[in-house]
Image (cartoon, helix red, strand yellow):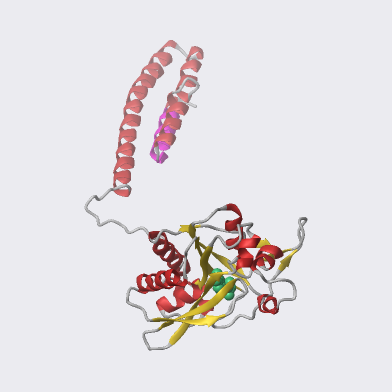
Amino acid sequence: MDINQLKKEARQKLKKASNLKEIEKVEQEILGKKGALRDILKSLSDKSLAQRKKIGQDANVFKQNFTKELKKKKAVLKEQHWSRKKKEEKLDLTQPGQKLKTGHLHPLTQVLRETEDIFKSLGFGVVEGPEVDNEYYNFDALNIPAGHPSRDEWDTLWVKSKEGDKLLRTHTSPVQIHFMENNKPPFRIIAPGRVYRHEDTNKSHGFQFYQIEGLMIGEDISVANFKALIQEFFNQFFGRSVEMRMRTGYFPFTEPSFEIDIKSKDGEWLELVGAGMVHPHLYKSAGYEERKWQGFAFGIGLDRLTMLKYGIDDLRLLYNSDLRFIKQF
Ligand code: DAH
């Protein structure tokens, strides 16, 4: 290639280069150690003195000029690069902030936390027990022996395991026994959790739901203590003075047993809690000294509580994860 060709080619290449990297490449190709200009200077040795002089001078001038041209284009590109960046990454400190979208707790969890807070403020501890338990804790220890009629209404799923058959607990009452086995009275606890039943699903029944178990045992804990406690709970939970009534009921693990209804705003009585004085069989199950302790137990349906609080008329809404529903809480 002769020097004129080189000049032409070099300027064409420079014109085409559209970023710093490409310019550096052009610089290498033309002025670099292994570049085209170098090749031309190398080939001078077979030329005449006059030619060497002329081409040599020409090459030098070109080198100087082209170096300047490269520099100029580099500067232009750099400027373009930064002004583009500035535009793209402009930070406007006066712009209003963007609200981060976060989720929130499920209504059942909200009501559970509220319930826990109320009982905690009344001196209760919060404990948990296993959701997969064995027959003894779910039934026998609670005075529900094999063949007892109430086993029929508490049919559930059974799980085969190495330690013998287990079941998905049908209520939170077995936590009473687990806790009593490991703790000496006096104490007061609640034990919230999920329970399971073999049941067709409808507006007010599900095969899984939540209960909150309560247990308070001491030397002289009475029905009056229970009545005062549950009244206080209702008042705090619903934020008004709630009218309630106690009816006699039947549960194998309490004697006497009662059911507590509250009066809704529309004047309707709604059953909300099962309760009673802890049956002597349970003290025996837990290995307590006979006739030394007395106390009460209760079970509240958390789903029922949530539905009442928010006026929800179908239990299934709480479990089918429909955001149009959940976002309302
Ligand atoms: N375990 C009962 C149920 O699932 C509810 C219950 C009733 C719990 C009376 C209690 C109680 O602790 O004393 O229907």
> Is residue 12 rendered magenta in the image?
yes
Looking at the image, the residue that sits furthest to the front is: 291
> Is residue 257 rendered magenta in the image?
no
* Position above or below: 216 against 316: above
The foreground one among 175 and 256 is: 256
Looking at the image, the residue that sits furthest to the bottom is: 267
State whether residue 213 appears in this view: no
Residue 129 drawn at (x, y percent): 59, 59
State whether residue 70 appears in this view: yes
Residue lying at 41% horizontally and 65% vertically, measured from the top left: 114
Residue 237 drawn at (x, y percent): 38, 71
* Position above or below: 106 against 309: above
The foreground one among 275 and 110 is: 275
User: In the drawing, does residue 6 fall left or right of residue 284?
Assistant: left
Residue lying at 76% horizontally and 56% vertically, measured from the top left: 163
Residue 291 drawn at (x, y percent): 58, 63
User: In the drawing, does residue 230 fall left or right of residue 94?
Assistant: right
User: Quick one: quadrant of the C terminus?
Assistant: bottom left
Please report the bounds of the magenta region as a residue range: 4-18
* Position above or below: 81 against 285: above
The foreground one among 107 and 218 is: 218
Magenta span: chief secondary structure: helix
Residue lying at 33% horizontally and 35% vertically, measured from the top left: 73
The foreground one among 90 and 186 is: 186
Tally of numbered discs: 0
Ligand 1 visible in quadrant = bottom right
Residue lying at 64% horizontally and 62% vertically, measured from the top left: 284
Residue 313 drawn at (x, y percent): 47, 83
